[in-house]
Image (cartoon, rainbow, N blue to C red):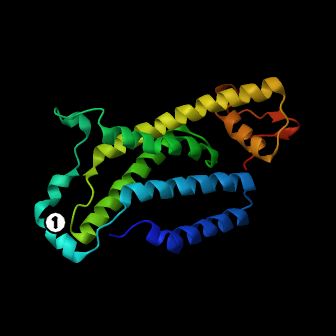
Amino acid sequence: MLRFHELYLLLVVPVLLLIVYILKSRGKSNVCILFYGVLFYYLIFVGKYTLFPIPVSEAYLSMIRPNSPFIERINLLPLWTDKNFTFITKEQILNIIMTIPFGYIVNYVMNKQNFFKLVRSGIILGTIIETIQLCISLSIKYPYRIIDVNDIIFNLIGVMIGYLIFRAVSFLFVKVVDLTKMEHNTFTKFVYSKSKVVNKRTKNKPYSYGGENFLKSE
């Protein structure tokens, strides 16, 4: 079995350092880089639990392949086409929970927050996971994971829930800051700027707080 920790130091750490270097060279703030780092480690966490462990022993694969027909572990039919589809299973709940953090965190790294852009990102995330699982399965000639288009749908639901949580938290944060006239540090200034943008009453309108323009890109 190929396990996640065997690749961690080889791939994850160098990629993270490269991301930090690129963001620094583009003039991103330290707080912005922090949120990119959180998003990166979240995606690594998702990869760990959706792709690993990977069976690589040919002796083991030769033994289990005859008992696992490939086609039976691939589903390309969305849930609304299956009359016998079962809702609210453990797998469905886990697929939803898994992507809630993505729907929340990604708002802090988007240049322009947009619900439809977020939906597109959620679909892409779920599709990438299922595609990588399929590619790995094809490469080892064994469906080590179930490839299911419905997983993408439930992943998207999780992303949308995360976005709604972000909207609620942002609304409350902005209200508290405005009411208390809280003085900003670098972190709260960044969070406030991202939170303020999602409020419809100020969308696409310039505003200032403490003499600074918070619509300026970080």
Q: Where is residue 70 in the image (x, y as percent from the top left)?
A: 17, 60
Q: Which of 211 and 91 is in front in this view?
A: 91
Give the number of marks.
1
Q: Up-down: is 212 above or below 179?
A: below
Which residue is found at the position 20% from the left and 76% from the top?
A: 59
Q: Up-down: is 151 above or below 20?
A: above
Q: Up-down: is 66 above or below 184?
A: below
Identified by mark 1, the residue type is: Ile
Q: Where is residue 186 in the image (x, y as percent from the top left)?
A: 80, 47
Which residue is found at the position 43% from the left and 59% from the top?
A: 48
Work out which residue is located at the far top of the displayed protein and give it.
179
Q: Quadrant of residue 64?
A: bottom left
Which residue is found at the position 53% from the left and 31% from the top?
A: 164
Residue 37 appearing in the image: yes
Horizontal side, residue 72 vs residue 140: left or right: left
Horizontal side, residue 200 vs residue 57: left or right: right
Q: Position of residue 19 (x, y in %)?
A: 62, 65
Residue 117 appearing in the image: no
Work out which residue is located at the far left of the displayed protein and give it.
66
Which residue is found at the position 37% from the left and 61% from the top?
A: 52
Mark 1 surroundings: few (<14), some (14-19) or many (≥20) residues within 10 A: few
Secondary structure beneath label 1: helix
Q: Nearer the viewer, residue 79 or 46?
A: 46
Q: Quadrant of residue 84?
A: top left
Q: Position of residue 21 (x, y in %)?
A: 68, 68
On-image quarter of the N terminus: bottom left
Q: Mark 1 points at which residue?
A: 64
